[in-house]
Amino acid sequence: MEAFRQEVRVWLEANCPESMRSAGAEDETVWGGRNATFPSEDARKWLEAMGNKGWTCPTWPKEYGGGGLSYDENRILQSELGRINARPALVSFGISMLGPVLLEYGTEEQKVEHLPKIVRGEIRWCQGYSEPGAGSDLAGLQTRAVKDGDDYVVNGQKVWTSYANHADWIFCLVRTDPDAPKHEGISFLLFDMETKGVSTKPIQLISGASPFCETFFDDVRVPRKNLMGKENQGWTIAKKLLQHERNMVAGMGMRGRTKNPANTMENQAKHYLGEVSGRIADASVRDSITQHKMDGEAFALTLRRTADEAKSTSAPSPASSIFKYYGTEQNKKRFEIMLKVMGSQSLGWEGDTFEERELSTTREWLRSKANSIEGGTSEVQLNIIAKRVLGLPD
């Protein structure tokens, strides 16, 4: 393995631009897609290098464009990326959510068509799950897909569709048997967002951002070959994908682990509250930050331990709900501490009396509240933990 580590180091030294070896701002995230934009030429080169190497999806099979790495090899790769503080070359719902279930449930034709494009960042995906009348009760969805020749004709509406207005394709839950019990009449479709009859409308949040959309389907024709899995058995795929999504959301709980000393909560607290003998002057804030750091380290070690235990399979378990819930609370708590530290400077929305970082932190605090909703509400996660992890009676 040391030979592989040396190989990774040499490759990263040759291919990771210096400007990509630091944490980027949120607006510098590379999402890929047919109309991809890049914050810099270095960001484009970094994605191209990682995509061609297959290391945007390092454990996916090489025949589908992935890196074909073993669990232990991927551990080394992630360690070396962390050592140089390399930012992600690509952020993608195709990587974190669709790809894993496509590998498990997709046809060979679907894998060959979609997976290499996900790896290289050529197609950007969005998720068509929640509806105005089907949020926590997702199985109550009413978007219909009716067979017509070689197509399904889709009609209905989705809501909270993240970045739907920028996405190229959608993975979408539809009802194909309205007479079946609600969990049993659902199918999983893949289709192009440029298909006639698809439209989106951004939703502005209290934070001022509009990452979510309403998405409408009016007589959208989807080839039947785009059905993933079996008709009316899409709920099984939907649940598995949600577990992958919850693992992704859980990662938000690690956001406080920064390699830039100026951005740590400790240094921010010293900036606003002062310091005594090198320590944060306010003892209660000092205790809160220390406890948050300890919780974060314990969380990171737990994630690593469970990954080690499950390395024989890439499939997440219902325990992903534990990590999603804890990661959500950890991220929310981080911003609560930061607002306490900033005092009245956390009350700004605009104006030159506030630093850009202060305005951004306040908006991120507001955005963090959605962590307890996306990927399944915290109440849903607690129910899953009670039933499927602890085995408690209904």
Image (cartoon, helix red, strand yellow):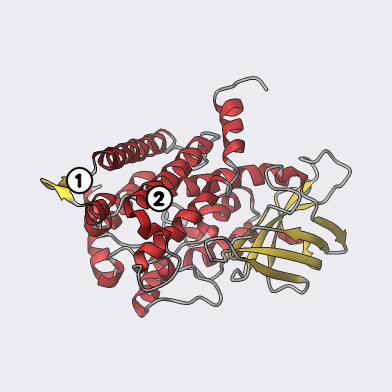
Q: In which quarter of the image is residue 82?
A: bottom left
Residue 340 x/y as whole percent:
36, 49
Mark 2: secondary structure: helix
**Mark 1: few, some, or many residues within 10 Å (few <14, many ≥20)?**
some
Q: In which quarter of the image is residue 165?
A: bottom right
Question: Does residue 10 appear anywhere in the picture?
Answer: yes
CA gap between label 1 and label 2 equals 19 Å
| Residue that carries the numbered disc 1 in the rendered image | 281
Q: In which quarter of the image is the C terminus?
A: top right
Left or right side of 287 for 359? right
Q: Do the residues labelled 1 and 2 touch (CB within 8 Å)?
A: no
> Residue at left 52%, top 61%?
207
x, y percentage for residue 305? 36, 34
Residue at horizontal 59 percent and vertical 61 percent from the top: 162
Location of residue 287 in the rendering, given as x and y in whole percent from the top left corner: 27, 37
The first of marks 1 and 2 along the sequence is 1
**Residue on which disc 2 sits:** 335
Mark 1 or 2: the one toward you: 1
Q: What element carries label 1?
A: loop
Residue drawn at point x = 59 percent, y = 58 percent: 111
Q: Which residue appears at 57% of the width and 32% of the height?
A: 382
Q: What residue type is labelled 1?
A: Ala
Amino acid on which the number 2 mark rests in the picture: Phe
Label 2: how many Cα within 10 Å (few below 14, some 14–19, many 20+): many
Q: In this rendering, is residue 286 above or below 164?
A: above
